[in-house]
Image (spheres, rainbow, N blue to C red):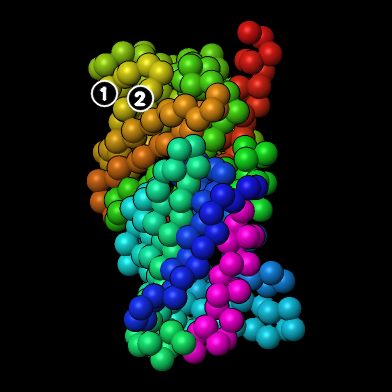
Amino acid sequence: MSQELNEVAIGQDQEIVFTRVFNAPRQLVFEAWSNPQHLIHWWGPKGFTNTFHHIEVRAGGQWRFTMHGPDGTDYPNLVVFDEIFPHERIAYTHSPGEENDPDFQVEAKFEDQGENTRLTLTMRFASTEARNNKVEFGVLEGGAQTLDRLGDALAQITTNPSTTFALALPSDREIVMTRLFNAPRELVFEAWTNPEHVAKWWGGCAQTVLVCESDLRVGGQWRTVLQEPGGAVHPFKGVFQEIASPELLVHTMIYDVEPYSNIVAVVTVTFREEDGKTRMIERIQHESVEARNGHLASGMEWGAVETLNRLEVVLEEMSREQ
């Protein structure tokens, strides 16, 4: 993973600023920074490993973890996310484990630089003395090594699309999932909307599609019914609200089982071209925080990973048939 720019500067007052340009699109760099599946592999200087105790990547969410040094020393950490703007900015407060004892604040900015991404990482301390203590502790070298590991992780992600899934919670009522597919946008849109294809990938690996119907027009309805190995049935339905092939699909979604059949979510799926590949962004807007949390508690994240992995296989088959 080439890095065209690698700079670190000591600010005039209480700041340390790292700047790095990565040979990867901005969405991918943000994903590597915000997805726990990726963070666990690169966070920290060379030789460090992590144990994640809890992580919720959203404004107000917390990330508790322990960093394990090469010499066996454990370092407890608490991150509280202050602001998150997908693909643009992450701001958080870091402490050694106590919310009322902040250590420093961090702002990570992600900017397009041609086809690459410029990352600006600013650490702000309570005083110049606190900043200087961190410098003496080795934060400059440690920060540079951490960004080196991020570069290595990005190289791995770009060669393995199945690792590009990310889930974010940008607001109390939203779930946003992204995935990069190694297929052109027209093919992904076709696989996503044609019931003949959808029936082959929708649902988890152990589930069977009993019904897959779709009237792909504004005002048209769709319906999919999944069955568990034990016989339990999960019916879903909705109405198409906006269709702009092959870029955009908006529809409602209802889990058609009492007492949930009156709870309506709005799903917006965007398909973006990236160097012959397609980045799918699925935004689910729930009616309430309770509905959103109930959806998350159902195990939908791992179900989504399995489902999108199955879609990747279907796309490979469709590509060979063309």
| Label 2 or label 1, whichever comes before in sequence order | 1
Q: Quadrant of the C terminus?
A: top right
**Is 14 included in the stretch rendered in magenta?**
no
For marks 2 and 1, give the one nearer the viewer.
2
Instruction: Choose top left, top right, bottom left or bottom right for residue 312.
Output: top right
**Which residue is identified by label 2?**
248
- What residue is shown at x 50% (from left), y 74% (from top)? 64
Residues rendered magenta in the picture: 133-151
Q: Assign a secondary structure to mark 2.
A: strand
Q: How many numbered marks appear?
A: 2
Mark 1 neighbour density, 10 Å: few (under 14) some (14–19) many (20 or more)? some
What's the residue type where badge 2 is placed? Leu
What's the residue type where badge 1 is placed? Gln
Q: Nearer the viewer, residue 300 or 245?
A: 245
Query: How much space separates mark 2 and mark 1, taking CA atoms?
Result: 11 Å
Q: Nearer the viewer, residue 127 or 79?
A: 127
